[in-house]
Image (cartoon, grey):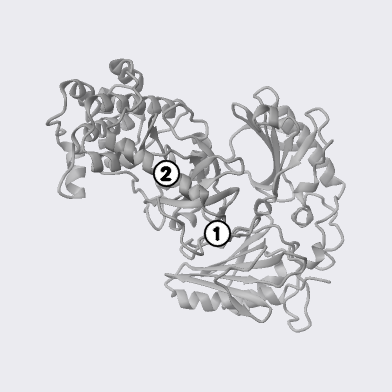
Amino acid sequence: MQPLPPGEPRQFGRYRLIASLGEGGMGRVLLGVSREGRLVAVKQVHPAFAHDPGFRSRFKREVETSRMVSGAYTAAVMDADPVAPLPWLASVFVAGPSLKEAVDAAGPLPLSAVHYLATGLASALAEIHRVGLIHRDLKPSNVLLAADGPRVIDFGIARAAEGDTDITHTGSIIGSPGFMSPEQANGLPLTPASDVFSFGALVTMAATGRAPFAGASTPQTLYNVVHSAPDLTNLHPDLRRLVEPCLAKDPKARPNTAQILDFLGSVQLTATPWPPAVHTMIERQQAEVRTALALPVPKEPRKRPKWLIPTVAAATAVVLAAVATTVVLTKREDNPTATAASNTSVPPPDPLSAAALRRVDPCTLLGPNSLPKSGKLLTTTDPDPQYDRCGFYFDRSAEISGSSFVSLQLSVLLPGKKGQPTKVGALDAIQSQESNSCSLAVSNPAIPDYGIEVSATRTAQTSCGIAQEAMNVLLAKLRDNPAPYPNVAKTLREADLCAPALKKPLQDATSETLRSEGHGLHECNWQGRNNYLLGKMHVTVPDENATKVGDSYLTVKQEGDSCVLAWTFPQHEPGWWDRLNVFAGTTTTSSGAKNCDSARRVLDVVVNAIKPRG
């Protein structure tokens, strides 16, 4: 665990970040604290994956399934956002070293500890397989040793990375050579038996300190996995009887998790299941967490964390975070070509259009008595304008440990969303229910592929009723053209960054033929030889690394062949600034410096087309 360096963002969505836990092939892991005080491990996906729409789709699907996994020996997925500029997920934080760290520090585990480990791993795999997932990357670093038992992490997430990205190429396989199955090494379709093979390799490594197929090089290791017998030297006979069938080359010859658990029998639980050195590592990490929690919280923007400006490596299809700021694109005398939709102060005729939804504060759409069937709403959570989202607690939440909650979001991506097709009035909808929560997403006919979502958490019997009542109230309120944000005309909230009037000046500035593709309410991708992603947001302070330009601030981040500019406008209402992000990513061989020049020209065009009124 490492402290966050000065200047590092301290907020990630609804989580306050307090330390860095490490970084792997899939991304970076940070220690965070939820608003409810729950410790979480936040995994921010590597920027090089973010530009691939296929990865995002797979990531969303796998995360949704992963959230169905429970059990004593898994680290439950609590939250995720596959459409964020850098997709991320948050899971329950587990204090303890990985199996790799434990074996490296303390040597092979004793027989009793291996038996405990094997039982926990088999139980975790049984739960993962129950919901239809295959772990695909079960390895020593994805097994944590907590004081009360092992935990399997990152289940199902490796599936999202098996595609064509800057890191993985078409047909490539994500996994660890010494612990993947022969069928995975050969790129064949996988079944749960693949995880059983990895389980056998893990148990062997834990008991002997060495993977059973380890070779002098990665190619040699993969060859051993596919063709050679495992090295089970020094393995206890009881463990050998467990491991040998798990490491069969033929998946059909391997036992399933139920058979493994039957073989292992009951566990003799003790207060210290691991070697003393491992418990010392656990206690050390717990102490580090207590120290990190005791540090003063740096003053950071509460509602617009700076991580929403993606790092430059966030490649060409990142959707720049956009959000609770209002933009008016209008004609300016000093740039007659940069015109846009005028008269936006008049509410548009379609209350579900993007122009109408940009103006609406979601936190004003429900009041204390809006849901008479479900109960009185007592508390509003901090708004999350990054996603046009707001949450509300019921007055009985204190009685049921804060589990009575309803949230609404004005723009959600619908393709690939799992659930039961249904109707809300004449509108198509998708309803998804879990153990004690329910979400209802209504398709918005004015914004293809996007919708409005309400989710509720209380009990399995009541959560869907709450969501349905809240959705009906929400749609009725929107159709009444609710009051806009205060001073909406003085902010950048209303701007359409895909406005047709921007096309010609942007093409003139870039010398490219461009086409636009909107992403929700506040982002647009202008695509040509290069990609120019525009997004807008609302911040409380400029970026601390920004350069002052007149009464505004400019941040430039260049890395490789990509460039990100962030232009922070002066305050138009007390305590707030507007920010416009421009991401330039190449699809050719342009240099990063050249893309920064292009991004600056794009920024100039858009800034000249924005004229907050008043």
- Amino acid type at mark 1: Trp
| Residue for badge 1 | 307
Please give left or right for residue 97 compared with residue 437 in the image.
Answer: left
- Give the image location of residue 282, x and y in percent: 36, 39
Q: CA distance from mark 1 to mark 2?
A: 28 Å
- Amino acid type at mark 2: Ala
At a point 52% along the width and 59% down the height, the residue shown is 317
- Give the image location of residue 450, x and y in percent: 67, 47
At a point 67% along the width and 57% down the height, the residue shown is 323
**Viewer-closest of 50 and 435:** 435
Q: Picture quarter containing residue 512?
A: bottom right
Residue reaching furthest left? 233
Q: Residues within 10 Å of mark 2 (few under 14, many from 20)?
A: few
| Residue for badge 2 | 287
Q: Secondary structure at mark 2?
A: helix
Q: Does label 1 or label 2 sit earlier along the sequence?
A: 2
- Give the image location of residue 566, x and y in percent: 59, 70
**Viewer-closest of 283 and 307:** 283
At a point 18% along the width and 24% down the height, the residue shown is 240
Position above or below: 228 against 581? above
Q: Picture quarter containing residue 436?
A: top right
Position above or below: 459 against 215? above
